[in-house]
Image: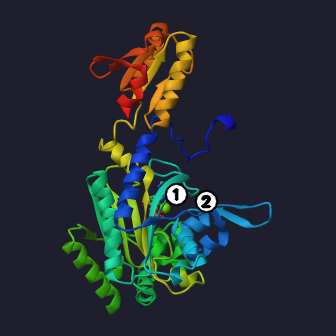
Amino acid sequence: MALITTAPRGTQDLLPENSFKNQWLESTLAKTAADFGFSEIRFPTFEHTELFNRSVGDTTDIVQKEMYTFEDKGGRSITLRPEGTASAMRLMLENGLDKGLLPVKAYYLIPCFRYEKPQAGRLREFHQFGVEFFGSATPKADCEIIALADECIRRLGVRGVSLNINSIGCPECRAEYRTALVEYFKKREDKLCKQCRERLATNPLRVLDCKDTDCDGDVENAPVITDYLCGECREHFEQVKTLLTESGVAFSVNPRIVRGLDYYNGIVFEFISSDIGAQGTVCGGGRYDGLSAQMGGSPICGLGFGMGLERMLLLLEKQGLLPDSGNGCRVFIGSMGEAAGKEAFRIALELRREGVAAEYDSVGRSVKAQMKYADKINAEYTVVLGDSELESGVCRLKRMSDGETKELAISDLGGFFR
Ligand code: ATP
Ligand code: MG
């Protein structure tokens, strides 16, 4: 296999004929976020490795197995971001946004990198729409980000996506749950995969999230966190459920949802589709009130979600919801002969400068081949310039949808399309 003509495994190219689909998806998400009062942020593609070790968590799959980490030429350990929350938090703390006007509401559209086993809906470079909400501890904030994800899904038009929510409690109630969970899994330790046996000691909640098909933890019958929530966590969870119901956001409580990253506490949620195979979680998120302090920052609370764009595109494609074409060519200026070819170029440029998408023959094709090309690029109108058109200053504009033609002065083309 020739390495220079083959993209690395688990990556995808975006081709010119498809990019309008991604642009449509991304602009729909950005507009929805903006309507909810979120502003875009951008941060580097790589960070100091320590940031992810400290935030995502040393015992998670991401940090232990999936990060693209390397030493740069200055001897620093650098990692291509596996997710966005750690960077967003770093950005907020470094720029002192936690000391300014709260809440801080931010979104981003980013590539993420994880060394995973590539399959449908699972890539090594994938893209996320992420949203973070810093500085509010109220159940309203939880409901707002859930409602935002829900509204994104509604605007995209996808059907059959169910919202699963859970509370994984605060460090206090989780400690008690953790003990109960370890006790339960210890009894069937021999049936667990090697990794889950290790997880029992380091991070037992992760056993609930194991994706190894040979691992038989009988997770179905394991103790559920919701039985262990303290009064405060229970009350918060109740309020979120009530507010969601009152706001018309449909959900089910699923006590198995624990999420794969360490920084979560309280409300966690996933939007799951059964339409795109095993990797059906199109969006996941939750609250991470301890993260800032864990990173050495002020004790500011936060919450957010990440939506996988490739999985969302799979779903949109499957349900036939993607737009047919992007903003196509409005007019193709064909030409016959050297002088007309130059004039076509000049007119196309003039139209483009006026914001009209115009195209001309840059290859030197015959008129017949030019028209075939115009058809392929879905030009709305075509016109062919030759010596006689140049002489008379009049051309014949053809509407491609029905073949109707119209005579007009070449100098009026701009006016016609403006
Ligand atoms: P999963 O359980 O599917 O591994 P996750 O819990 O690791 O997902 P998050 O870290 O919450 O995922 O990322 C948010 C979203 O990003 C996921 O819900 C999913 O839609 C998408 N995503 C995560 N990993 C990948 C990947 N390797 N390829 C494509 N999309 C991904
Ligand atoms: Mg994962």
At 46% from the left and 71% from the top, the residue drawn is: 207
Tell me how many marks there are: 2
Amino acid tagged 2: Thr
Residue that carries the numbered disc 1 in the rendered image: 110
The answer to whether residue 215 shows anywhere in this view is: no
Q: Residue furthest right?
A: 74
The answer to whether residue 110 shows anywhere in this view is: yes
Amino acid tagged 1: Ile
Q: Is residue 68 above or below residue 401?
A: below
For numbered disc 1, what is the local secondary structure?
A: strand
| Quarter placement of the C terminus | top left
- Residue contact between numbered discs 1 and 2, judged by CB atoms under 8 Å: yes
Residues 47 and 172: in front is 47
Q: Quadrant of residue 228?
A: bottom left
Model colouring: rainbow
Q: Residue furthest top?
A: 388
At 52% from the left and 51% from the top, the residue drawn is: 123
At 43% from the left and 15% from the top, the residue drawn is: 393
Few, some or many C-alpha atoms within 10 Å of disc 1 (few <14, some 14-19, many ≥20)?
Answer: some
Q: Which mark is residue 69?
A: none
Residues 161 and 417: in front is 417
Left or right of residue 238: residue 296: right
Q: Is residue 375 above or below residue 18?
A: above
Q: Is residue 253 above or below residue 308?
A: below
Residues 99 and 384: in front is 384
Residue that carries the numbered disc 2 in the rendered image: 45
